[in-house]
Image (spheres, helix red, strand yellow):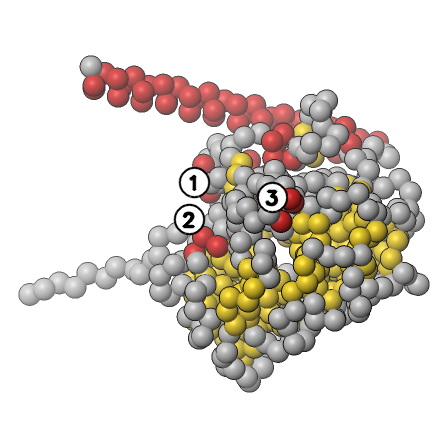
Amino acid sequence: MTIMTWRPQYRCSKFRHVFGKPASKEACYDGVPITRSVHDNHLCAVNPRFLAVITESAGGGSFVVLTLHHTGKVDPHHPKVTGHRSNVLDLKWNPFNDYCIASCSEDTTVKVWEVPPQGLLRNLTAPWKELQGHSRRVGLLEWHPTASNILFSTAYDYQVMIWNLDCPEQVIKNPLRTISHHPDVVLSLAFSTDGSLMATTCKDRKVRLIEPQTGSLLQESKTKVHRAAKVLILGNLKMILTTGTSIWNVRQIALWKQDDLSVPLLQEDLDGGSGILFPFYDPDTHMLYVVGKGDASFRYYEISAEKPYLNYLTDYRSLLPQKGMGVMPKRGLDVTSCEVFRFYKLVTTKSLIEPVSMIVPRRSESYQEDIYPMTPGNIPAMTSQEWIDGVKRGKHHLDSTKGSKEAGGNDKGHEDGSPLSNGQDLALCSPPKTENELRLKFHKQQEEIRRLRELLNQRDVRIMQLELEINNVKNLHS
């Protein structure tokens, strides 16, 4: 007689128990007049030094830039970037310079700003560069992921323009190249990891794959069963992911083979919600986060190269609906708490920005090497001229084990080797205004010193282990 043994069908994954941890009230940004614009963008941009948020303004367009430690109640008269003549629709930090941010507006221009190292002390009205080429409002910006100072913009004139900021002119009127493959407004634009491919979605609901250096159209989707709105290239899996709706207006995720956009590999119906779905992908953990505009919660998945491709993990639940989301680059995360992703959630109803950390639960407090593989750093792989000349080169990577100095330091303003805390220059933090704030900062620093000591002890133990292993190998071979 054969005895059947039951085995639970668990998938082996180190990210099955990832959970979202909202920041305490003191660590949120309160009193920020978040824009009431209905434009479908993130409306917020973050790097290891600054948080920028598009604000509501009467006459002209503005956004606020806060140093990352400027938490708590924000002064209603806090200085803003106010150089646009109409509403700001999108903003993006330069991935290779934490003090440089680009913004685009309904006034048809793109402006690039230099933020002082200590943050804004007065309103900033004069941009470093102004890009004039679009004939209608500019809705979307993306920096090239590997070439320095190459910026992409797309507007309601259906054009995608490529700009080279490494030129002497302050006002640039001629883009490097204009890509004109779209019959309607471009809704989303994304790059492959090495920047050699660009994917777009358009109001005609098609996905297009374009070579950005030449501007040539490589592929175009034909299917009518999935109407794509936002797109990502999952570079390390050779796949493209889109979020959108089915023909029945059900919100959907679709996965496509990168070299075949004829039909999706997979379509996953989610719900009948009305807000657009923003996808965020972490190539280091293969995790996908799907955030609905206007929803209070968001879902997250693990993506694999084999069927079933999309593995649902769980939901992050909250009572506060999000208007937009900012995402911290990998080099700004807190590795000591096993943080693998961090959102900055815009809650318009409360004028609040709430950081939400995605944490991998681990018992040990030592550095978890397996969840922090090599990750793209903040040094460009090539100059703008090399990119224009047709050079193809992947990203420079940094090892998460290296201290935050490599992770957060830019060429600009850090030759003095000031101390950095999680990508933050402690010397540049806004000074405490009250005794309570001073006490809080003191406790934060004490906690940081304690963690760093523990980290050093763990490293010492690891070094001893490796030395023992090397000796053992030598003994075996002798």
Of 133 and 327, the residue lying toward us: 133
Of 407 and 311, the residue lying toward us: 407
Report the side of 80 relative to 235 (left or right).
right
Q: Position of residue 101 (x, y in %)?
A: 75, 48
Amino acid type, label 1: Asp
Amino acid type, label 3: Glu
> Taking the image as drawn, is residue 211 in sight?
yes
The residue to which callout 3 is attached is 386
Q: Any mark on residue 327, and which?
A: none
Q: What kind of element bears circle 3?
A: helix
- Mark 1 touches mark 2? (CB < 8 Å): yes
Q: Earlier in the sequence, mark 1 or mark 3?
A: 1
Which quarter shows the N terminus? bottom left
The residue to which callout 1 is attached is 370
Of 391 and 236, the residue lying toward us: 391
* Up-down relation of residue 56 to residue 221 (above or below): above
Report the side of 242 relative to 203 (left or right).
left
The residue to which callout 2 is attached is 14
